[in-house]
Amino acid sequence: MPAHAGDCDHCGGTGFRIRRVGDYDQATPCSCRSRARGQRQLTSARIPRRYEHCELDNYEIHNDSQAEARRRARDFAEAYPPAHRSGILFAGPCGVGKTHLAVGILRDLIQAKGVPVLFVDFRELLKEIQQTYRPENPLSADQVLRPIFAAEVLLLDDLGASKMTDWVRDTLGHIINRRYNEERITMFTTNFPDRDADGENDDTLGPATLANRIGVPLRSRLDEMCQTVEIHGPDYRRAFLRAGDRW
């Protein structure tokens, strides 16, 4: 039953509206069924509470790059599924609203098209996989990764945020290559500038690029999987927190 009895004024919670057609009663699905399905999909998307309010309509625009980023986010959601199975990569400094836009896309895909989506914080995912190595943990790494491989649309948030050990790079490569080979749509956000790598993967070289953070081969694969949307500007999150607002 899509709703608790009595929740819907039209069907009383049965999920069907009854109307008389000639000598017979005809049952048609009530609109509350699609609303309930959308709510279940929002829950299963695992969008963190911090970002539950994020929509494309309430994204704050402070410069031209943010206006262009929201336009491209809208175009992506409206045109879904993309003709070339291409995802989207939001790149830019902290506090310019990359995750806000990405979550706004997820919400639009759920609400307008009923697309099953999944939000994954890359750092939290790594911790969850590491937990499976403990003998008392009933889950295996494969079980943790299974919904990530299967999601029709995956948002991998904060790409490159964790120190890129060989294990982290191998795990990221496994996810990216599996979804690439199965032609599943993947979105990413990253705080690292999206310029060509100009040195080895070494934090002592100065501000890292995305390419020298995750490795040139993986960055090249992202070019095949995603359109890149760069957002510029100061950290508006910090300014909003000072003002007591939410980003």
Image (cartoon, grey):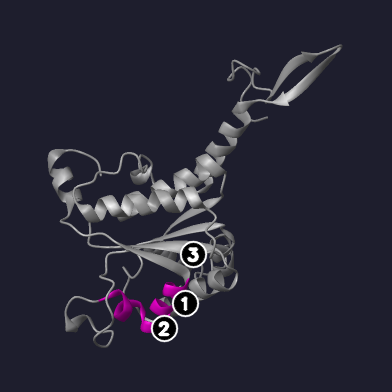
Precedes in sequence: disc 2 or disc 1:
1
Q: Which residue is mark 3?
A: 86
Q: Which residue is mark 2?
A: 217
Name the residue that disc number 1 marks. 173
Packing grade of label 2 (10 A; few <14, some 14-19, many >=20) is few
Let me know if residue 60 is in the magenta part. Answer: no
**Residue type, numbered disc 3:** Ser
Query: Which badge, 3 or 1, is on the more N-terminal residue?
Result: 3
Dot 1 crowding, Cα within 10 Å, few <14, some 14–19, many 20+: some
Q: Amino acid at mark 1?
A: Gly
Q: Are marks 2 and 1 in contact (CB under 8 Å)?
A: yes
Mark 2 to mark 1 CA distance (whole Å): 9 Å
- Taking the view exactly as shown, the residue that stands out farthest to the bottom is 200
The magenta region covers 209-224
Secondary structure of the residue carrying tag 1 is helix
Residue ID at (37%, 83%): 216
Residue 146, how many percent across, how many down?
58, 64
Mark 2: which amino acid? Pro
User: Which of the numbered marks, if any, corresponds to residue 20?
Assistant: none
Quarter of the image with the N terminus in it: top right
In which image quadrant can residue 8 be found? top right
Q: Nearer the viewer, residue 238 or 141?
A: 238
Left or right of residue 183, residue 208 in this image: left
Residue 48 vs 190, above or below: the answer is: above
